[in-house]
Amino acid sequence: QVHLVESGGGLMQAGDSLRLSCAASGRSFDSLGMGWFRQAPGKEREFVASITTDGANYRVLDSVKGRFTISRDNDKSTSYLQMNSLKPEDTAVYYCVAKEKISITWQWWGQGTQVTVSS
């Protein structure tokens, strides 16, 4: 079992930057693919970004490319989502996710952290 704890959410203004953190425990962190999803009010949950176990490869949602960056620090067992130039449409609950390298589905989810961006 992997336990994920997100932090860093808050109330921001458009154009601000924010970094979310996700601390993982329960399994060797460098064996886990990590990612972020978000769910805005009244909308379905959507994929935001993911990063491979070694950090060599990553994917980012098209609508946040150039603004959001995913990274990880395997020594600290922590994944990050750096969000720049925030927009009101980025308002959502952001969830950290993890999976074993061979899994095709995200196996573990955090509780989520709220990010609210005002115009």
Image (cartoon, helix red, strand yellow):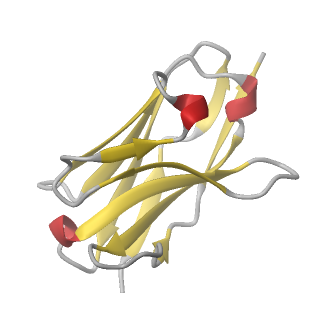
Residue 22 at what x, y percent from top left?
Answer: 39, 54
Q: Is residue 116 above or below residue 38?
A: above
* Left or right of 75 on screen, residue 4: right
* Left or right of 19 on screen, residue 93: right
At x 63%, y 51%, the residue is 38
Q: Is residue 111 above or below residue 40?
A: below
Quadrant of the rendered image containing residue 70: top left
Of all residues, the one furthest to the left in this rendering is: 75
Of all residues, the one furthest to the bottom in this rendering is: 1
At x 83%, y 49%, the residue is 41
Q: Is residue 61 above or below residue 6?
A: above
At x 57%, y 66%, the residue is 111
55 or 110, which is in the foreground? 55
At x 61%, y 31%, the residue is 63
* Left or right of 20 on screen, residue 33: left
* Left or right of 9 on screen, residue 99: left
Count of numbered circles in the view: 0
Residue 79 at what x, y percent from top left?
Answer: 32, 51
35 or 104, which is in the foreground? 104
Image quarter hosting the N terminus: bottom left
Residue 98 at what x, y percent from top left?
Answer: 39, 68
Image quarter hosting the C terminus: top right
